[in-house]
Image: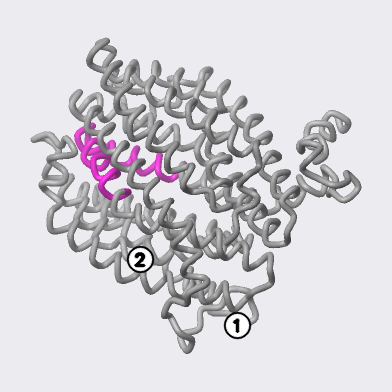
């Protein structure tokens, strides 16, 4: 067993002969796996628990009926479009901070955090104001039906109105992840989601004397979680003895070196986010046109798929943090090892999830809804989710490693092809032309993940990204 482990994760076997000078200069399999595991487990646990809480959130909203599930689900894509710019900047933050950590440049890392925080705070207020003002036309364009538009508008205005606090948390956590401090992100996100669940229970159906606010209560609970998480994140960078320290006495204005590095990575990531979010938005609009029942089923299955993404995202965060630090230390060979080690772990986890989703498909769907049509249709989609798991986890790891290395332009082009064009066109073809309905839409999901895995996997394997300077 131990021998098989050593062979599977042996750094020398994970590298081409031209990618390292001597196998004796590499860490052992145990050292590589051990360090990856120490950084990865908080991120995996965080993503997994957040996914579970998101599922619980859907279950609790589901007590109001499938229309409420659809109303909340309709807001997801507009919310993510608003967050796209900040997610792009945060890719740059993680990439630059991880490099500065590897170089031992504490001042550069902290200046990067300060300048991006200022930009993110101002932009979040502007974008959230626009989204709140035009909530109704945005949601109508997204495919809201007469039975969902009222609740969807209420939910969107409250959640996106409070997104400033979410943006502050995301930016600080991105910098913490660049330093390898994945625990802080875990603490803030898990706490935020626990707060969300508690106030969901109190406000959705009016328990313990609290008012019964329905979907509005779910929105308020989400924002309260944002506020608590942002306070925790700010406290985490107010300790002078730590590598990351947010000093309000230092300049928040951009400096040429670090800001240019963030923008170089973040601009391509922004293009990728635009392609992704527009593609996801059109995809959601296609599904919404199938009716409220189908969209509710889609929303439930999307929550379940997030469990797979949780493992991939957790491993990707750890791998990219260690990869960035290794590149800062001028060790591209070790950077490649961390990426490939994480991907092999991901395949093993994906295979287990595949078996679980196939075996327990109906059991997993039933807590979300008691409606027979949703259970039957959702159980069929679970087969697609099961097959998708190994591909999705590996794709997420490769893509994130390329982003943090600075190869964001390539990942953006892949997203344009696979999501912006491929998924939407394939979804329309299978859904309407072939008449497969929601099943056809989910087949396009599988095609998208397969394309991105192949394209990003090949790019990572060639190793050209190790030569990009930030």
Quarter of the N terminus within the rendering: top right
| Above-or-below relation of 172 to 25 | below
Q: Earlier in the sequence, mark 1 or mark 2?
A: 2
Q: Which mark is on residue 273?
A: none
Quarter of the C terminus within the rendering: bottom right
In the rendered image, residue 75 lying in the magenta stretch gets the answer: yes
Percent position of residue 288, x then y = 21, 30
| Above-or-below relation of 326 to 290 | below
Q: Which mark is on residue 240?
A: 1
| Above-or-below relation of 265 to 350 | below
Percent position of residue 52, x then y = 46, 42
Label 2: few (<14), some (14–19) or many (≥20) C-alpha neighbours in 10 Å = many
Tell me if 414 is positioned left or right of 348 in this view: left
Tell me if 329 is positioned left or right of 198 in this view: right
| Above-or-below relation of 138 to 183 | above
In the rendered image, residue 451 lying in the magenta stretch gets the answer: no
> Start and end of the magenta stretch?
52-80
Percent position of residue 331, x then y = 74, 55
Tell me if 346 is positioned left or right of 225 in this view: right
In three-dimensional space, the C-alpha distance between marks 1 and 2, rounded to whole angstroms, equals: 23 Å
Residue in front for this viewpoint, 88 or 156: 88
Residue in front for this viewpoint, 460 or 199: 460
**Which residue position holds label 2?**
165
At a point 63% along the width and 60% down the height, the residue shown is 180
At a point 28% along the width and 62% down the height, the residue shown is 162
- Going by the picture, which residue comes out furthest to the top? 434
At a point 48% along the width and 86% down the height, the residue shown is 250
Q: Secondary structure at mark 1?
A: loop
Q: Main secondary structure of the magenta part?
A: helix
At a point 52% along the width and 70% down the height, the residue shown is 258
- Going by the picture, which residue comes out furthest to the bottom? 249
């Amino acid at each position: 067993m131990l021998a098989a482990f050593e062979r599977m994760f042996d750094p020398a076997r994970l590298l081409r002969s031209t990618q390292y000078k001597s196998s004796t200069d590499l860490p052992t399999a145990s050292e590589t796996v051990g360090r990856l595991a120490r950084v990865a487990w908080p991120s995996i646990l965080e993503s997994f628990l957040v996914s579970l809480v998101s599922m619980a959130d859907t279950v609790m909203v589901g007590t109001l009926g499938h229309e409420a599930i659809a109303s909340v689900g309709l807001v997801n894509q507009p919310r993510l479009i608003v967050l796209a710019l900040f997610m792009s900047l945060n890719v740059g933050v993680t990439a630059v901070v991880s490099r500065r950590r590897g170089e031992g440049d504490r001042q550069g890392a902290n200046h990067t955090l300060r300048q991006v925080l200022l930009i993110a705070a101002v932009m979040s207020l502007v974008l959230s104001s626009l989204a709140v003002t035009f909530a109704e036309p945005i949601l109508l364009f997204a495919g809201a039906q007469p039975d969902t538009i009222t609740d969807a508008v209420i939910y969107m205005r409250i959640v996106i109105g409070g997104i400033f606090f979410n943006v502050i948390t995301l930016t600080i956590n991105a910098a913490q992840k660049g330093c390898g401090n994945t625990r802080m992100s875990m603490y803030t996100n898990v706490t935020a989601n626990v707060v969300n669940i508690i106030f969901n229970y109190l406000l959705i159906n009016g328990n313990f004397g609290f008012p019964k606010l329905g979907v509005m209560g779910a929105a308020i609970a989400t924002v309260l979680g944002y506020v608590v998480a942002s306070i925790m994140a700010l406290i985490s960078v107010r300790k002078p003895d730590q590598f990351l320290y947010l000093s309000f006495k230092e300049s928040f204005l951009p400096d040429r070196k670090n800001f240019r590095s963030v923008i170089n990575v973040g601009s391509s990531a922004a293009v990728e986010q635009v392609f992704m979010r527009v593609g996801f938005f059109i995809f959601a609009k296609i599904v919404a046109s199938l009716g409220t029942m189908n969209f509710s089923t889609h929303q439930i299955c999307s929550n379940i798929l997030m469990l797979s993404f949780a493992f991939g995202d957790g491993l990707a965060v750890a791998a990219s943090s260690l990869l960035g630090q290794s590149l800062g230390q001028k060790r591209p060979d070790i950077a490649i090892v961390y990426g490939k080690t994480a991907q092999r772990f991901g395949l093993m986890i994906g295979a287990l999830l595949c078996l679980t989703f196939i075996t327990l498909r109906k059991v997993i769907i039933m807590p979300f809804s008691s409606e027979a049509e949703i259970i039957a249709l959702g159980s069929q989609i679970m087969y697609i989710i099961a097959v998708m798991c190994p591909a999705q986890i590996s794709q997420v790891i490769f893509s994130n490693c390329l982003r943090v290395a600075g190869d964001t332009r390539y990942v953006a082009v892949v997203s344009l092809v696979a999501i912006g064009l491929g998924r939407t066109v394939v979804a329309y073809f299978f859904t309407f032309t072939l008449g497969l309905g929601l099943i056809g839409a989910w087949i396009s999901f599988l095609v998208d993940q397969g394309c991105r895995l192949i394209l990003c996997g090949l790019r990572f394997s060639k190793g050209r990204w190790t030569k990009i300077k930030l």
